[in-house]
Image: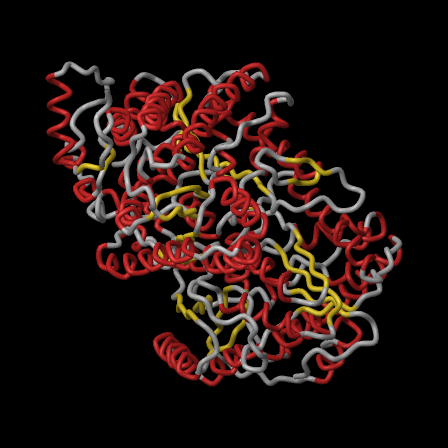
């Protein structure tokens, strides 16, 4: 799997699923969602007691990224919000903190999200982007939408890892460079395996082994509800609304369509999970969380109380061989008990 | 003539209380021996040292009888609102209504300390999957489930958005357990960008007008919910009256802090000052009594300054303290080590700043909510800390980490760097759990080293 390729246009890096890549691309800039790899970056931000390993890895990746002309972070989690304070002091690239509301049940919160997209647009223009026309935005949105539809349609023919990598490739490289061609070429023979879901925050590159380990142990991730997986992809656009008011539809699909543990209340996440778990006949759940990620950690027990399915808790602190062996063994044991 | 100021034990306070009784010194209805609270389980009180003034006794008794006050309010038919996280804004609105009492269930974070873990609240939180990797505010879950530490409010209102993840996650867990919450959004405060109108907020931060308007719209939702809850119209006039009353509290605290932090001899210990500051956030469930308690404390401080008396050594190191301590005893410890508090930032400085009275009340409250130091950047917070250090001539800073709190992992580094760069004062970062007994020696060593560093710097 390739990592982010150098592009001729200016690159804007980000991490949060609530940042629409289409919006950046429509400004004529190259969006690239960072998938941190703590094993390959130098670490200007060292380990700190209480700090989420993903936040640390993201900061190190962003600070080390000399190609990026802009970095976007969001307020979806407090550690990321605080991480922005570190970023602005250490990073040479221009940086932007986007307010993503936690609440969603009132119009004011939805309007705030749209206002923040407009403010992000002004930031992108300051970095050399061009404010898109409605038609220009609509065109980019439909292009992304088509690739996402193709990725979704290919789920049955891809391994869980290939599926996750396709989603990641779209985020990292965009629709023209991303997973499209690879999807067409990939064929995966799916042997009957125990259907599982993986739920949690974002994965790092080095964590993608988890899909292989599950398969080698007799399981198959049929629902990738991580932030970097299917859960973090916005839903299909309404084509009529894309033509009428593309920015509103963009906001609707992202802010209204991506369910996350950070939402208040986060009841929609459980509604979404109930539907998807049943639809895919999931038999067990791998709950993967970073140590010090309060948002997901607090959902673990609640999820166990909510579902009749067995739940395996995988907590990770970073990228150590010992830790890797530990979670690999736990997954194998989990699958043994299920089969 | 006043008694010579000194810090005394709980036992000594009981003896002193007997003397006061014999002298027929009047006590408020909630007055009495301090040790009676130990019988209720507040065992940490046995290990603290207290100021020996009658004003301090009143302060402590006021604090430690809040639960009784809340239950009495309910018995009298008053409605109880649980306000969460915003630390100071929503209670101003709630207390503007008749027969409504508001308090912060968040305050349960001190129960594990005060009851020395005997209440079992943290075990309950553990059983709900909220373990020690979260901030001690997780005790709030146990307090709700047992119903033993405060009456369960009929309405819960919680700010969310630019808040710490611990609290947000714990409040969500509470919501999931069947305690429905009205969530309102507080966005991350930012500077106005070119073309945007900038508003200077109480306390000195600034924000774009659109953020003030957004927060106002959120507080309008809260206002409507309060009106429905109380079956009353919350008019602008009532809100303005509530703001004036809150400002009375804030003015008293401002005077108290200025006098205590700038006096040659420390006229009031750190522990009592911490408790006094806390009264600002929800008036300890009785706004009028809060004013009386603070007035007495202020009179005591003025008297001591006039008499030229005080506590601690006159060369005590002047320390600025960042974040509240989970273990109250650490305030005593700092003084044992030769320090005194000269400036604080206990996460709620916005509850100490006067609310603008020359604005429509909802605009004023929105500005106040946005002035919360925790909704902005750590750099913003550091700039205010620097201004206060200059104002109170503090010589060193202690950043007290709250175990597990999401903001503590990174903010200390940023605040420390900025303070050192701007003011060149020593900065010490420590972590204070709910009970520090097992690490007292380590904390003492570090605080003593800081005090020593301050004294060395004076020689240069």
Can see residue B401? no
Q: Give the residue displayed 28% in from the left and 57% down from the top.
A: B444
Q: Give the residue displayed 13% in from the left and 16% down from the top.
A: B23
- Tell whether A318 sits left or right of B360: left
Q: Give the residue displayed 43% in from the left and 45% down from the top.
A: B171
State the image coordinates of residue A63 (x, y, percent, origin top left): 64, 70
- Tell whether B138 sits left or right of B94: left
- Tell whether B350 sits left or right of A174: left
Task: Judge by depth and name the residue closer to the eye, B186 or B277.
Answer: B277
Q: Quadrant of the N terminus of chain B?
A: top left
Q: Quadrant of residue B404?
A: bottom left
Q: Give the residue displayed 54% in from the left and 50% down from the top.
A: B382
Can see residue B255? yes
Position of residue B118 relative to residue A324, above or below, is above
Task: Judge by depth and name the residue closer to the eye, B67 or B423.
Answer: B423
State the image coordinates of residue B63 (x, y, percent, origin top left): 29, 31
Q: Quadrant of residue B453?
A: bottom left
Task: Judge by depth and name the residue closer to the eye, A280 or B347.
Answer: B347
State the image coordinates of residue A38 (x, y, percent, origin top left): 54, 77
Q: Quadrant of the C terminus of chain B?
A: bottom left
State the image coordinates of residue A165 (x, y, percent, origin top left): 63, 77
Report the residue that reaches farthest toward the front.
Answer: B459
**How many numbered discs sit on the rendered protein?**
0
**Colour basis:** secondary structure
Position of residue A81 relative to residue B291, above or below, is below
Q: Quadrant of residue A141?
A: bottom right
């Amino acid at each position: 799997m390739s990592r982010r390729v150098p592009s001729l246009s200016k690159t804007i890096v980000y991490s949060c699923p609530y940042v629409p890549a289409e919006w950046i691309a429509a400004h004529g800039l190259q969006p690239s969602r960072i998938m941190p790899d703590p094993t390959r970056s130098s670490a200007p931000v060292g380990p700190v007691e209480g700090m989420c390993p993903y936040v640390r890895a993201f900061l190190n990746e962003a600070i080390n990224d000399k190609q990026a002309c802009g970095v976007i972070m969001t307020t979806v989690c407090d550690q990321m919000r605080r991480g922005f304070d570190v970023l602005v002091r250490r990073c040479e690239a221009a940086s932007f903190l986007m307010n993503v509301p936690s609440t969603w049940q009132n119009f004011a919160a939805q309007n705030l999200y749209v206002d923040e997209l407009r403010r992000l647009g002004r930031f992108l223009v300051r970095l050399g982007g061009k404010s898109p026309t409605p038609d220009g935005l609509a065109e980019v949105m439909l292009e992304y939408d088509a690739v996402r539809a193709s990725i979704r349609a290919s789920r049955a023919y891809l391994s869980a890892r290939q599926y996750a990598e396709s989603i990641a490739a779209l985020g990292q490289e965009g629709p023209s460079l991303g997973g499209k061609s690879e999807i067409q070429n990939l064929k995966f023979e799916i042997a009957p395996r125990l259907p599982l879901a993986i739920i949690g925050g974002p994965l790092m590159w080095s964590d993608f082994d988890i899909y292989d380990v599950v398969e080698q142990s007799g399981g198959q991730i049929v629902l990738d509800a991580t932030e970097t997986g299917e859960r973090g992809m916005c839903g299909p656009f309404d084509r009529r609304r894309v033509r009428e008011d593309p920015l509103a539809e963009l906001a609707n699909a992202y802010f209204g369509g991506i369910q996350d543990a950070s939402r208040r209340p986060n009841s929609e996440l459980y509604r979404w999970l109930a539907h998807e778990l049943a639809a895919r006949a999931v038999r067990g759940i791998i709950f993967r969380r970073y140590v010090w990620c309060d948002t997901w950690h607090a959902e673990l027990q609640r999820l166990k109380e909510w579902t009749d399915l067995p739940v395996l808790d995988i907590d990770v602190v970073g990228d150590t061989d010992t830790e890797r062996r530990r979670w690999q063994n736990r997954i194998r044991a989990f699958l043994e008990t299920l089969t | 003539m006043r008694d010579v100021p000194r810090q005394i034990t709980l036992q000594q306070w009981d003896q002193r209380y007997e003397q006061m009784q014999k002298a027929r010194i009047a006590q408020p209805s909630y007055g009495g021996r301090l040790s009676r609270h130990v019988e209720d389980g507040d065992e940490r009180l046995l290990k603290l040292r207290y100021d020996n003034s009658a004003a301090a006794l009143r302060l402590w008794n006021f604090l430690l009888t809040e639960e009784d006050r809340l239950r009495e309010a309910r018995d009298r038919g008053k409605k109880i609102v649980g306000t969460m996280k915003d630390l100071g804004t929503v209670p101003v609105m709630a207390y503007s209504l008749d027969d409504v009492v508001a308090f912060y269930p968040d305050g349960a974070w001190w129960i594990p300390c005060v009851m020395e873990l005997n209440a079992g609240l943290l075990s309950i939180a553990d059983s709900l999957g909220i373990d020690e990797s979260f901030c001690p505010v997780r005790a709030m879950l146990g307090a709700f489930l047992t119903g033993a530490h405060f009456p369960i409010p009929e309405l819960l209102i919680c700010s969310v958005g630019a808040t710490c993840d611990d609290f947000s996650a714990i409040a969500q867990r509470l919501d999931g357990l069947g305690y429905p919450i009205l969530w309102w959004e507080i966005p991350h405060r930012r500077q106005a960008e070119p073309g945007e109108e900038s508003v200077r907020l109480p306390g000195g931060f600034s924000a774009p007008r659109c953020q003030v308007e957004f927060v106002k719209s959120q507080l309008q939702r809260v206002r409507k919910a309060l009106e429905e809850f109380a079956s009353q119209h919350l008019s602008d006039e009532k809100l303005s009256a509530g703001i004036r009353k809150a400002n009375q509290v804030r003015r008293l605290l401002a005077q108290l802090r200025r006098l205590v932090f700038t006096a040659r001899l420390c006229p009031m210990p750190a522990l009592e000052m911490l408790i006094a500051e806390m009264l600002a956030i929800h008036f300890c469930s009785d706004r009028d009594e809060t004013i009386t308690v603070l007035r007495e404390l202020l009179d005591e401080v003025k008297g001591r300054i006039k008499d030229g008396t005080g506590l601690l050594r006159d060369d005590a190191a002047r320390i600025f303290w960042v974040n509240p301590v989970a273990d109250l005893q650490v305030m005593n410890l700092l003084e044992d080590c030769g320090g005194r508090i000269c400036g604080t930032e206990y996460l709620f400085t916005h509850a100490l700043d006067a609310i603008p009275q020359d604005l429509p009340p909802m605009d004023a409250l929105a500005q106040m909510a946005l002035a919360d130091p925790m909704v902005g950047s750590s750099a913003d917070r550091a700039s205010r800390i620097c201004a206060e250090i200059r104002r109170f001539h503090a010589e060193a800073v202690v950043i007290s980490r709250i175990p597990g709190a999401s903001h503590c992992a990174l903010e200390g580094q940023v605040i420390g760097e900025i303070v050192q760069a701007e003011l060149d004062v020593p900065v010490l970062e420590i972590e204070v759990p709910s009970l520090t007994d097992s690490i007292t020696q380590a904390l003492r060593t570090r605080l003593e080293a800081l005090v020593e560093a301050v004294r060395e710097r004076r020689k240069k």
